[in-house]
């Protein structure tokens, strides 16, 4: 007999808000093809099928324009080579249709807009290719570069609350180009992603954006004081904008001493208790981790373990469905149509 977790998992639209697999394949010289690889990658077609994931926000570039174009080509080829398995999603209806058709919707996601140079035209072209999620920065550089969207990004290495507050007074946020990118994303229908942004940039972007932003992958600072974690005031501000944060499966984002599924659930529960069940989801960061990292769950074929843990934690069916993908789907609908 099916368990409640299995039924919910099977019925839900599941959205993974950050995946680095194609970029990892490229870096290792392997085909950028979910159907052509196996170990040592977290993701391949068989595991993605087993996972039940409906939509995968897939890394298609960061700082290097040529690499980004090659990654775009790889993403766009998947529906051509595997038409019964993959589709590129440009609108929320594409994700919903993929669920009906038992396909996997690939969503183009930049992990930094630095590859654009200072060209808003390039951003518009990427949107035509299918870009629907854009990280403002990957924390590039100590100095202000012509292509950076935030200033002093890599000084964002503070793991105490006091240091974080001091950092907010000392560093600057969005550059002028960064502000232009936020406005252009709003006008085109691209979700602004605040993962990797320093705190000042985070708040600058939320204040400027006329649409909900997301934090696709990271952790909760109150549970795991890692510099990539969101502090409670950031979680509140993100939620007030209608946004969603994704908890990542990297063990160092889960707990510094004893990472486990229960500690990951502590992060989910913290967000739910703080701002409600509408503002947290999953952003695994599969294949974006150090080679020796063992994520929790260890690969998408075991994603059911995440759902089982949500059920054990006592979340009701509606909350489980929202966390698995309903929350990110809502933002996708609002921003991308």
Image (spheres, rainbow, N blue to C red):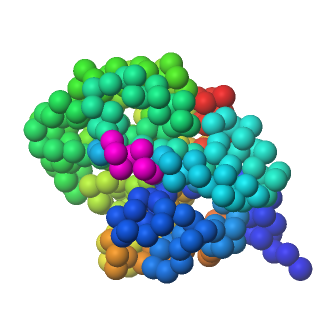
Q: Is residue 241 above or below residue 313?
A: above
Q: Quadrant of the C terminus?
A: top right
Q: How many marks?
A: 0
x, y percentage for residue 108? 52, 44
Q: Quadrant of the N terminus?
A: bottom right
Query: Which residue is at a point 29% across and 44% down the rendered structure image?
Result: 63
* Relative depth, front residue between 21 and 169: 21
x, y percentage for residue 38? 54, 78
- Residue range (magenta): 65-71
Query: Which residue is at a point 27% across and 31% down the rendered structure image?
Result: 117
Query: Chief secondary structure of the magenta span?
Result: helix
* Relative depth, front residue between 314 and 27: 27
Answer whether residue 3 is visible to the viewer in this image: yes
In the displayed structure image, the side of residue 323 where residue 60 appears, left or right: left
* Relative depth, front residue between 297 and 34: 34
Instruction: Determine which quarter of the picture holds residue 141.
Output: top left
Query: Which residue is at a point 57% across and 66% down the rendered structure image?
Result: 34
x, y percentage for residue 327? 63, 44
x, y percentage for residue 42? 50, 73
In the displayed structure image, the side of residue 194 where residue 334 appears, left or right: right
Q: Is residue 184 above or below residue 89?
A: above
């Amino acid at each position: 007999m099916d368990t409640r977790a299995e039924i919910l998992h099977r019925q839900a639209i599941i959205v993974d808000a950050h995946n680095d697999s194609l970029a990892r394949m490229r870096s290792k010289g392997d085909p950028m093809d979910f159907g052509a690889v196996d170990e040592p990658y977290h993701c391949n077609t068989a595991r993605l099928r087993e996972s039940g994931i409906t939509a995968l926000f897939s890394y298609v570039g960061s700082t290097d324009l040529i690499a980004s174009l090659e990654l775009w080509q790889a993403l766009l080829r998947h529906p051509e080579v595997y038409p019964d398995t993959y589709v590129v999603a440009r609108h929320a209806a594409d994700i919903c249709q993929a669920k009906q058709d038992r396909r996997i919707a690939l969503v183009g996601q930049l992990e930094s807009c630095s590859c654009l140079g200072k060209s808003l035209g390039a951003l518009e072209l990427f949107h035509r290719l299918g870009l629907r999620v854009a990280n403002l920065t990957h924390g590039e550089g100590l100095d202000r570069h012509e292509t950076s969207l935030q200033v002093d990004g890599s000084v964002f290495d503070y793991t105490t609350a006091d240091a974080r507050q001091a950092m907010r007074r000392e560093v600057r946020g969005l550059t002028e180009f960064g502000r232009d990118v936020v406005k252009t994303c709003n006008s085109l229908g691209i979700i602004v992603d605040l993962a990797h942004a320093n705190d000042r940039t985070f708040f600058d972007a939320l204040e400027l954006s006329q649409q909900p932003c997301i934090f696709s992958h990271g952790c909760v600072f109150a549970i795991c004081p890692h510099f990539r974690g969101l502090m409670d005031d950031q979680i509140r501000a993100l939620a007030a904008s209608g946004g969603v944060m994704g908890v990542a499966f990297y063990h160092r984002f889960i707990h510094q001493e004893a990472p486990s599924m229960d500690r990951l659930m502590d992060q989910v529960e913290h967000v739910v208790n703080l701002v409600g069940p509408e503002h947290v989801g999953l952003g695994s960061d599969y294949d974006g981790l150090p080679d020796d990292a063992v994520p929790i769950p260890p690969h998408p074929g075991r994603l059911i373990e995440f759902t089982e843990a949500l059920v054990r934690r006592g979340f009701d069916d509606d909350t489980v469905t929202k966390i698995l993908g309903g929350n990110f789907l809502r933002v996708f609908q609002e921003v991308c149509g």
